[in-house]
Each structure stands twice: as C-alpha cells, then as structure tokens.
Image (cartoon, grey):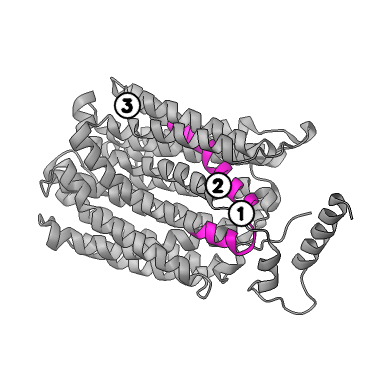
C-alpha cells in the first residue's frame, strides 16, 4: 500500500471518529482515539511557551519599574498608564489580524516575524530617552506580540493531537496566569539591581534563542493559495484606532470628568470607528473574524470572560504596585518580592486546576475562580488605607491568586474546545484580543474609578474604591459564565470537530 493510500485511510478514519453518533455523544474521548493519535516531542511546546511567557510577562513587568522610569524620563500623570496601555492596545487590537495571518500564511514564518519585531522593540524600549519614545516602542512590542501569540497557539494546535493537545492547552493557560504575576516580581528585581532598562533588555537574548531554535525544530507550515490570502487591513486599522480612542477617553475622565465635552467627543469618535469596523467586517470578502466564528459559543463566551478577568488582574497589579511603593513604603525590589506569594499561589492553583479539568467542567472552574477572586477583592477593598503589607495586603493577594490560577487554565480550554485546528490562529487571536484589550480597559477603568494616583493621599482613597469596582466586574462576569459558557470537561479540548 502506498504512503498516500495509508494517509487517505487514516484521514478517513479520523473524520469518521469525529462524526456525531446517532445517540447522544459522550463528551469524553475514548482511549482508542488517543492511542491512534501520534505523539510529538514537547520541544515545540516548550519554545512556544517560552515566547508566550515573554509576551505575557511584558504586560506586568513594567508595573514595578514605572516609578523609576517615570523619574528618569520625566513622565506626566497620563504617561504612566500609556506605558502599559500602548503595549496591550496594539497587541489586542492587532491580534485578530495576526490570527488571520497565522491561518493563511506559513505559521512558523508569522511566529518568527512577530518574535523579531517584539525583540527589536524591546531593545528600543530599553534605549528610550523620552516618554514618547518609550510609548511608541511599547506599541511596537504589542504589534510584534499580535503576530507571535496566535501563531504560537496555532503551531501548538496543529502539532499535537488528542490528550497531548488538551495537556498543552492547559499548560498554555497556566503560563498566562503565572506570567502576569511573575512579571511584577522580575520587574522589581531587575529594576533594583540592573536598572529599569533591564526589564526590556532581558527579552533580547531570550528572543534570539527562541528564534534560532524555532528555525531548527519547528517545521515550516503550509501557506494558503493566493486566491485565499486576502486580509482585512482597513478593519484592523479601524479596530485599533477605535480602541485607542476608547482608552484615551476613559483615561482622561479622572481629570476632565465623564460629562465633559472632551470625554463625549472621544467616546463618540471611538463608537463611530468601532461601528465602521463592524460595517467593514460585514461587507469585506475576507473579514478578520469570519461570520461563523461568532457562532462558536464556547469561543465567544470564554473570550468575553477572559477580557474581564485580565482587566481585573492587570488593573489590580498596576494599582497594588503603586500602593505598595507610595503608601506602604516598599522599594522596587521589596515590591517585587511582595508579589511572590501571589505568584506562588497562582502557579500552584493553576497546576492543580490543570489536573482537575478532566473531571471538573471548565464552566464550574471559572465560576469557582470568580467567586474566590471576589473574596480576595473584598479583602483588598476593606484595607481602608492600611499601611501594613502583612495585615492589609497579603491576605487579599493570597485569596485573589487562589481564584486567578484556575481561571486562565479553564478559560483557555473552554475557548478552544470547539475550534478546529485549521482555524486555531483565528480563535487564539480572538481569545487573546480579549486578554490584551481587557488589560488596557481594566487599567483605564480602575484608574478612572480610583481617581488620583499621583499622590500618597490620593492612592489611600483610590485603592479601596478601585476594588469596589473590581467586585462589580466580577459579579457581571459570573452571570456571563453561568449563562453562556458551555458545561464541558477539559478532555474535550483536543477533539474539536473540523469544519469541512
């Protein structure tokens, strides 16, 4: 029998396994399915995780360094937020575009292009001599991440099958949660011992190493025919522009107010641009998100929850970094170490969650995480300007982290459970768009709710107010989870039915 005939017979068998049975199908894959799926070495997963860890790290690694960077580059009040928001806005706004690139072009090529852009922009950020140069470099980092992230997850989805894919997705979700917390720890250590530039320079050798190994280890992917390689650049531009104006409008409310003409005009312009994006998506032959993707309930609902949870986590870390340094009086390295218990709890609970997902549904785990996070936010909101880390901050950190760990693992598995490998780049782009845009909006909204963050007295009043806002956000996300997220176990993630 020829190799082509063997491959055809295997493909037919695979398709037959994915066809629904006449009776209600079981949600748990059989051992036979997993046994017939070829196993691949974990080297590819390790490289993709290392690159993604670097990307996630950069969401929060700058937080602890911000006071030092602000003094060195003479930051204004708004520059502090934009040093964070520029990165996550361009990453989130362009992720859908990057996801389409990963699906239509060579996945390895898109991954390496994004990695090179991200690494070069990291070098430029470390060499910045002004606030504007840093903010522009951070935006370029985000653009690189927008190509890197969906291509990495797409490579994982097309490399692994069966239970290997389920395990890979669980670890991918755990990297998302630990990277955010670890970023604050590394930010404090690097800033204190090597200077604020080191938080950016550290990406350069890692990026070079991952690029070299990826070129050798990961095989080149396939490129779609030229007739299919149509990309919605106007949609990407209007989406990013609308999101930038939205965050800019929210950021300015604590000085101009929600009822000011400036806020109204900016919000109006943002709505118009986002509406234009919607019109372009409906009319273009190659939308960033194909119409059928909006019908994948698991993907849309989990991506929505991802946006809210990430906004809460990144916003909480942002505010806590300022609070610990300006109110509690910790140094940069002490602040980094103060986040170590939070990082440890997130890592530990994420590891436990990864093992439980085969028996506990992702919806149950997400709902549990939201309730626990709410308890942690309540503890932090009741601090009432307390100046003791051990008594007023650490208990809330520990409880908050115990909810965060399971959340990102469960959300990643839930989002990808119904997505076929051929559209994994698009799906990961949509999911991570929620992650990045949520981070930008979370920082902006909690900053606006809290108020003045530039003075010690302002922070003492802003900190509990912001966590009252966190409680409201988590309550809304719990309702969305219970209503919209499908009730499935994590073992379903590796067995999405392909779209033919």
Alpha-carbon span between mark 1 and mark 3: 38 Å
Q: Quadrant of residue 485?
A: bottom right
Q: Which residue is mark 3?
A: 126
Toward the top, the furthest residue is 129
Q: Is residue 158 magenta?
A: yes
Alpha-carbon span between mark 2 and mark 1: 9 Å
Q: Closer to the N terminus: mark 1 or mark 3?
A: 1
Q: Quadrant of residue 64?
A: top left
Mark 1 lies on a secondary structure that is loop
Q: Nearer the viewer, residue 313 or 217?
A: 217
Mark 3 lies on a secondary structure that is helix
Residue 250 visible in this rendered orientation of the protein: yes
Count of picture labels: 3
Q: Position of residue 265 (x, y in %)?
A: 43, 33
Magenta segment boundaries in residue numbering: 141-170
Identified at 39% across, 26% down, the residue is 137
Residue 40's tag is 1
Q: Residues within 10 Å of mark 2 (few under 14, many from 20)?
A: some
Residue 272 visible in this rendered orientation of the protein: no
Q: As displayed, is residue 349 above or below residue 26? A: above
Q: As displayed, is residue 174 above or below residue 112? A: below
Q: Is residue 499 magenta?
A: no
Q: Position of residue 378 (x, y in %)?
A: 26, 65
Q: Quadrant of residue 227?
A: top right
**Contact, mark 2 vs mark 1 (Cβ under 8 Å):** yes
Toward the right, the furthest residue is 1
Q: Nearer the viewer, residue 306 or 175?
A: 175
Is residue 452 toward the left or the right of residue 474 in the image? left
Q: Main secondary structure of the magenta part?
A: helix
Identified at 33% across, 23% down, the residue is 132
Q: Which residue is mark 2?
A: 44
Toward the front, the furthest residue is 1
């Amino acid at each position: 029998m020829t190799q082509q005939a063997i491959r055809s017979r295997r493909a037919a068998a695979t398709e037959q396994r994915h066809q629904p049975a006449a009776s209600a199908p079981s949600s748990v894959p059989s051992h036979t399915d997993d046994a017939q799926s070829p196993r691949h070495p974990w080297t590819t997963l390790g490289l993709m995780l290392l690159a993604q860890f670097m990307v996630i790290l950069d969401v929060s690694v700058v937080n602890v360094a911000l006071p030092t960077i602000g003094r060195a580059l003479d930051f204004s009040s708004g520059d502090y937020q934009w040093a964070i928001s520029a990165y996550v806005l361009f990453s989130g706004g362009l992720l859908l575009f990057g996801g389409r690139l990963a699906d239509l072009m060579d996945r390895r090529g898109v991954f390496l292009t994004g990695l090179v852009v991200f690494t070069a922009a990291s070098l430029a950020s470390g060499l910045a001599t002004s606030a504007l140069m840093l903010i522009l470099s951070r935006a370029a980092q985000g653009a690189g991440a927008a190509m890197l992230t969906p291509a990495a997850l797409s490579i994982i989805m097309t490399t692994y099958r069966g239970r290997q894919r389920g395990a890979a997705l669980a670890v991918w979700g755990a990297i998302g949660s630990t990277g955010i917390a670890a970023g604050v720890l590394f930010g404090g250590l690097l800033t204190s011992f090597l200077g604020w530039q080191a938080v950016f320079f550290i990406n350069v050798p890692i990026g070079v190493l991952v690029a070299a190994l990826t070129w050798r280890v990961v095989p080149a992917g396939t490129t779609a025919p030229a007739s299919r390689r149509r990309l919605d650049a106007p949609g990407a531009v209007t989406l990013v522009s609308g999101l930038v104006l939205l965050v800019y409008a929210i950021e300015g409310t604590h000085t101009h107010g929600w009822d000011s003409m400036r806020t109204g005009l900016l919000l109006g312009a943002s709505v118009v641009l986002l509406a234009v994006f919607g019109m372009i998506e409906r009319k273009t032959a190659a939308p960033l998100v194909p119409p059928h993707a909006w019908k994948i309930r698991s993907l849309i609902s989990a991506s929505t929850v991802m946006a809210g949870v990430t906004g809460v986590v990144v916003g909480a870390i942002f505010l806590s970094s300022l609070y610990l340094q300006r109110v509690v009086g910790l140094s940069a390295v002490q602040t980094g170490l103060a986040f170590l218990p939070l990082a440890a709890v997130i890592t530990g609970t994420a590891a436990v969650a990864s093992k439980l997902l085969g028996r506990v549904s992702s919806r149950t785990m997400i709902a549990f995480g939201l309730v626990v996070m709410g308890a942690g936010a309540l503890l932090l909101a009741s601090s009432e300007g307390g100046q003791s880390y051990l008594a007023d901050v650490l208990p809330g950190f520990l409880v908050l982290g115990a909810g965060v760990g399971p959340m990102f693992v469960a959300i990643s598995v839930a989002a990808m459970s119904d997505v076929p490998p051929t559209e994994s780049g698009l799906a990961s782009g949509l999911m991570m768009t929620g992650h990045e845009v949520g981070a930008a909006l979370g920082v902006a909204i909690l900053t606006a709710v809290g108020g003045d963050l530039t003075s010690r007295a302002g922070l003492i009043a802003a900190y509990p107010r912001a966590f009252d806002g966190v409680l409201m956000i988590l309550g809304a996300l719990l309702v969305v989870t219970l209503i919209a997220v499908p009730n499935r176990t994590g073992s379903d993630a590796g067995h999405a039915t392909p779209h033919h």
